[in-house]
Amino acid sequence: MNKIQKYFVYRQSLIEQYLKGDMTKREYLKMNYNAVIHNDIGPFKYIDTVEKGLYNYQYYNALAKEMKSMSGRNIDYDAKYDYNQQAE
């Protein structure tokens, strides 16, 4: 089993734990992010297999979800509300 296959087996175990209720969605996303970012696999520059394409998708998807979660941490909700009211 190569490294990409090991990642997908690990990811599937995370999904199963999440579906059973053993972890929250946030915990699942964080663990998946750590698995994707802190390994020595990719992202791949040249995608010559479906596995590499799927891995790149997971890599960038995990990265985007982590950045999205970080972007909402220090929101000034009053300023956001005022901005949204002005936009209407």
Image (cartoon, grey):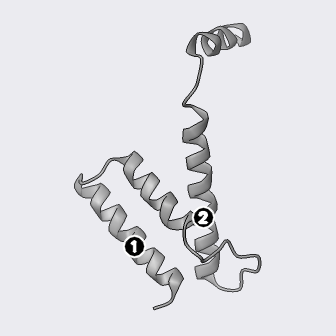
* Residue name at image x 24 percent, y 52 percent: 21
Residue annotated with mark 1: 10
Q: Residue at x 58, y 81 (%)?
A: 51
Screen quadrant of the N terminus: bottom left
Q: Quadrant of the C terminus?
A: top right
Alpha carbons under labels 2 and 1: distance apart: 14 Å
Q: Nearer the viewer, residue 85 or 9?
A: 9
Q: Determine whether the residue tagged by mark 1 lies in a helix, strand or loop.
A: helix
Q: Looking at this view, is 50 or 6 the one in front? A: 6
As shown in the figure, which amino acid type bears the numbered disc 1? Tyr
- Label 2 sits on a secondary structure element that is helix
Up the image or down, 66 lies above or below 36; here it is above
Residue under the image location 72 percent in, 80 percent down: 47
- In percent of width and height, residue 76 lies at 60, 17
Q: Nearer the viewer, residue 61 or 42?
A: 42
The first of marks 2 and 1 along the sequence is: 1
Percent x, y for residue 31?
A: 43, 58
Identify the residue at the far right of this view. 45
Residue 44 sits above or below residue 80 on the image: below
**Mark number displayed over residue 59:** 2
Q: Which amino acid type corresponds to the residue marked 2 in the rendered image?
A: Tyr
Where, by quadrant of the figure, is residue 75 drawn? top right
47 left or right of 8 in image = right
Give the percent coordinates (x, y) of residue 61.
59, 57
